[in-house]
């Protein structure tokens, strides 16, 4: 394998990047680490990862565009295939540097931006190549730094696919050849050791038999080196024969307990006794040698030093023992080499099996962990890697996992404080809503009853069914019981009117009391909309406070990490802030993402679900009126579509009610009002009341409130006349309802089939599915992602792919503008399932609140803004107005964006 660097049109090639016969790394043909060092390098301890160098032909590192590509080893290489590009496609990373068959290290180039480790790696590559080209570092140092980058960053990120099976099988064959050679060497060395041991045993027996080694006087004439070697050998022989003696004694004991084999006892005893005599003699020799070479003379008599007498057999004994030691060390080294080669083979086989069985890409990191191999090597222990052999992300993670470090303490305290704030905010919200549920009681005078009847959710259905079976007379009045002393005169002075009540939760009016008596329950909602609004408003204020706390936590942790890891302040190196933020957010998300999701979901999901339900009732061509994107998928629009006069649907006067009558249900605001204020509110005009309760915008009128309380009588009296003359009513642009799409098709039988399919959401999904499937795939990945930056990356990928696919449908000359991209996103969001629609918006709101300032103005920021604008466009539809009025905290305008 070779590595080609490109920096400012200058190229540097590093050849012969591979593994040796023992599968240890080579760069430029030499080991990029010191072989004599007592502390083994991670390159040698975890060399199994380098099997990929046998499957890769070239790695291309473009320092200018910060991209990495690689080319596998090809079968029957065609020179034309690997030739440099002459005319590269428009989206090519490099027009002349990268071969046409090169594979990107990461298909999504945003990995280099969002992964702090990869961003740090590209910075190191640029710096190393620049210094080497300027002769600031030697070739040896350059090769060592390249090996470090390959081992820590690049090789573990190389993934293989089915088309690379030839390269992997070739690498496997090369590794198996090395393994076969190692096994043959092991067999040869083992045979040599066996022969030497037999020779030494025979020589030892001859010396014991022919020489008087029990005599200390004789031993003093022997060479001291021989005596030490012979003593070690004697002790080893004693251990072996003692084990044999124990085994023989066990046989004798067994024979004594079995009478049937008594004839064997003498034979076994004879063998045991012989071993005992041999052991006894070896013990005497051992003690005599120890007295000569190591023990001091206890008597005061002087012992004359004897001259050493040369003995060729003694010298042969020492030499044979030395050769056995050498061969034993060689055997250990060969076994270690075999373990290392086997590790590389297992890693290769694991990748091949995965591709052959599943067809999926192999993991970014090989399944074989080199650390598992090192545990079996004799004399080695697991050693923690130095910081220089860790990625930037791993270094940050190690600091944050060290309980004594200052960043860990700040991180833990900050996360605990944030979690407490979130739990408190959610508890307060639940308390307010639950209190509103329990405090609302409805007491009404029902025909046929002498006193008031209290209706609760438990007895509502039972009472309503009973009422339908009774003879109902017109009610005289309806009162509501409150905890406060409220003057109810203003609410009971319309004794002869059919009263209906507005449901603040759903935005629809209650049926009249007469209708409820015919079988429909007249119970008011359990919690009015004002309660929910105020609870949500308070919750979203807590969210703003939590955002500030998160900002402070990130700043404090990043600052301490900068001092701890980089030995300087983040203010001195701006790029350092970005790397530390990207690294820390992953650790932060592991602790807090679930809690934040729960908080944002609680604050937003009520309004978003309601908005989605409202949007699903509006036809697609009404959402995207006259947009050319509909022509792209459904053909040209007929002239009459969207231009015909809207036919209004006339409201019954009974569906119109004064809002003064709809505030009878207790709410947080009313509960704190004085009696005089309640009296004034009950008799005020509905529009002014709406402004007081902040239920409407200035330019909008509630869909169920058309007139003030003073005009109710005239509305009722004109009901019949209005109904009879409905065909003469002219459409009112301010309060009209268009026919449904089905009615439009009946009115216009000449509508084209494609445009007619816009009324059927299943047909719409079928038409749009080829374009929206990739978008949904990346949105699903966004929802499943476990950190902020991965969510941003998947959203960007989804929008870019959607833009590219639709642009291809328009044609090669089409260029997307901002409005076109937003329109595409509106089209995509309009055809999303409810859970994805809600989940994506919640993620979007969270991302726009948490993302740092260094992403402002980037492509990723633009994509988030575009997606937010698409949601904003949908929420601006008339069908969503009432929902936004009910849950204003769930919908944030573009001007309200925040940054952390």
Image (tube, rainbow, N blue to C red):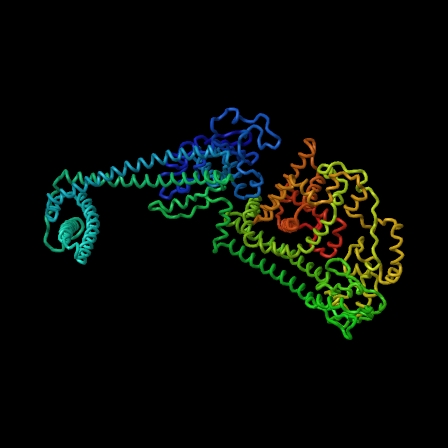
**x and y percent of residue 448 in the render?**
78, 72
Q: Is residue 463 above or below residue 79?
A: below
Q: Nearer the viewer, residue 9 or 517?
A: 517
**x and y percent of residue 146 in the render?**
46, 36
Residue ID at (21%, 41%): 197
Report the side of 235 relative to 682 (left or right): left
- Say which quadrant the N terminus sits in: top left
**x and y percent of residue 177 in the render?**
37, 33
Q: Nearer the viewer, residue 486 or 235?
A: 486
Residue ID at (57%, 35%): 65
User: Is residue 351 in view from this perspective?
Assistant: yes
Q: Nearer the viewer, residue 215 or 341?
A: 341
Residue ID at (80%, 48%): 738
Q: Is residue 298 above or below residue 316?
A: below
Q: Nearer the viewer, residue 498 or 559?
A: 498
Report the side of 506 relative to 410 (left or right): right
Q: How many marks?
A: 0
**x and y percent of residue 150 in the render?**
47, 38
User: Is residue 134 in view from this perspective?
Assistant: no
Report the side of 583 relative to 427 (left or right): left
Report the side of 401 relative to 288 (left or right): right
Task: Single out the residue that lies furthest toward the top.
Answer: 79
Splitting the image into 4 quarters, where does residue 698 fall? bottom right
């Amino acid at each position: 394998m070779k590595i080609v660097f490109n920096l400012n049109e200058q190229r540097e090639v590093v050849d012969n990047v591979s593994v040796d016969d023992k599968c240890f790394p080579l760069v430029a043909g030499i080991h990029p680490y010191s072989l004599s060092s007592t502390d083994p390098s991670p390159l040698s301890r975890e060399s199994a990862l380098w099997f990929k160098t046998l499957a890769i032909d070239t790695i291309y590192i473009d320092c200018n565009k910060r991209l990495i590509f690689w080319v596998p080893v090809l079968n029957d290489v065609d020179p034309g295939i690997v030739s440099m590009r002459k005319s590269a496609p428009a989206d090519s990373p490099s027009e002349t540097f990268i071969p046409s068959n090169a594979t990107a290290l990461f298909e999504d180039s945003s990995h280099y931006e969002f992964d702090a480790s990869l961003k740090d790696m590209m910075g190191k590559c640029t710096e190393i190549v620049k210094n080497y080209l300027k002769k600031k570092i030697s070739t040896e140092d350059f090769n060592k730094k390249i090996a470090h980058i390959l081992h820590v960053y690049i090789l573990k990120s190389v993934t293989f696919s089915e088309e690379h099976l030839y390269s992997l099988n070739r690498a496997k064959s090369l590794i198996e050849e090395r393994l076969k050679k190692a096994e043959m060497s092991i067999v040869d060395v083992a045979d040599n050791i066996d022969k030497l041991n037999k020779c030494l045993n025979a020589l030892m027996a001859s010396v014991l038999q022919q020489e008087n080694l029990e005599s200390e006087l004789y031993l003093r004439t022997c060479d001291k080196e021989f005596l030490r070697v012979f003593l070690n050998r004697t002790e080893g022989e004693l251990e072996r024969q003692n084990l044999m003696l124990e085994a023989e004694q066990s046989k004798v004991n067994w024979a004594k307990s079995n009478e049937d084999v008594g004839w064997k006892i003498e034979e076994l005893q004879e063998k045991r006794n012989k071993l005992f005599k041999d052991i006894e003699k070896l013990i005497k020799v051992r003690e005599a040698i120890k007295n000569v070479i190591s023990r001091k003379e206890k008597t005061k008599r002087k012992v004359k030093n004897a001259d050493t007498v040369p003995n060729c057999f003694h010298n042969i004994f020492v030499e044979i023992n030395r050769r056995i030691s050498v061969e034993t060390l060689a055997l250990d080294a060969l076994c270690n080499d075999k373990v290392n080669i086997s590790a590389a083979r297992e890693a290769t086989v694991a990748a091949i099996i995965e591709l052959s069985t599943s067809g999926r890409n192999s993991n970014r990191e090989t399944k074989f962990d080199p650390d598992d191999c090192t545990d079996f090597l004799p004399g080695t222990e697991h050693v923690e890697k130095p910081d220089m052999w860790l990625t930037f992300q791993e270094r940050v993670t190690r600091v944050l996992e060290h309980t004594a470090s200052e960043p860990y303490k700040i991180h833990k305290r900050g996360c605990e404080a944030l979690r407490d704030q979130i739990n408190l905010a959610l508890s307060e919200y639940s308390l307010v809503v639950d209190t509103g549920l329990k405090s609302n009681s409805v007491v009404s005078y029902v025909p046929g009853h002498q006193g008031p009847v209290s209706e609760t959710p438990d007895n509502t259905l039972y009472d309503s069914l009973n009422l339908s079976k009774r003879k109902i007379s017109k009610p005289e009045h309806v009162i509501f019981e409150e905890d406060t002393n409220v003057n109810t005169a203003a609410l009971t002075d319309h004794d002869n009117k059919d009263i209906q009540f507005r449901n603040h939760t759903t935005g629809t009016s209650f049926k009249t009391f007469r209708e409820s008596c015919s079988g429909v329950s007249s119970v008011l909602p359990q919690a009015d909309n004002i309660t929910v609004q105020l609870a949500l408003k308070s919750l979203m204020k807590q969210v703003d406070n939590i955002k500030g706390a998160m900002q402070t936590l990130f700043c404090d942790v990043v600052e301490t990490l900068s001092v701890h890891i980089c030995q300087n302040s983040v203010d001195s190196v701006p790029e350092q802030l970005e790397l530390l933020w990207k690294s820390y957010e992953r650790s932060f998300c592991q602790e807090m993402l679930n809690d934040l999701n729960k908080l944002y979901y609680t604050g937003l999901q009520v309004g978003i679900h309601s908005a989605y339900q409202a949007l699903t009732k509006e036809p697609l061509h009404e959402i995207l009126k006259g947009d050319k994107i509909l022509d792209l998928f459904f053909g040209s629009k007929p002239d009459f579509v969207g231009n015909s006069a809207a036919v209004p649907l006339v409201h019954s006067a009974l569906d119109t009610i004064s809002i003064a009558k709809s505030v009878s249900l207790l709410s947080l605001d009313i509960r704190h009002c004085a009696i005089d204020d309640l009296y004034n509110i009950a008799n005020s005009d509905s529009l002014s009341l709406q402004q007081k309760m902040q239920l409407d915008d200035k330019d909008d009128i509630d869909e169920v409130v058309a007139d003030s309380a003073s005009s109710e009588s005239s509305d009722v009296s004109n009901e019949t006349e209005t109904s009879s003359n409905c065909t003469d009513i002219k459409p009112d642009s301010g309060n009209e309802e268009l026919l449904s799409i089905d009615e439009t098709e009946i009115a216009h039988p000449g509508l084209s089939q494609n445009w007619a399919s816009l009324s059927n959401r299943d047909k719409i999904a079928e038409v749009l599915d080829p374009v929206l499937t990739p978008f949904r795939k990346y949105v699903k990945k966004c929802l499943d992602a476990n950190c902020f930056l991965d969510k941003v990356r998947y959203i960007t990928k989804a929008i870019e792919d959607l833009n590219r696919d639709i642009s291809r449908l328009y044609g090669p000359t089409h260029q997307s503008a901002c409005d076109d991209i937003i329109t595409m996103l509106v089209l995509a969001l309009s055809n999303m399932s409810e859970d994805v629609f809600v989940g994506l918006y919640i993620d979007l709101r969270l991302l726009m609140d948490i993302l740092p300032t260094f992403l402002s103005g980037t492509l990723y920021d633009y994509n988030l803004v575009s997606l937010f604008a698409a949601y904003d466009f949908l929420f601006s539809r008339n069908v969503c107005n009432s929902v936004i009025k009910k849950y204003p905290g769930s919908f944030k305008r573009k001007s309200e964006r925040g940054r952390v």
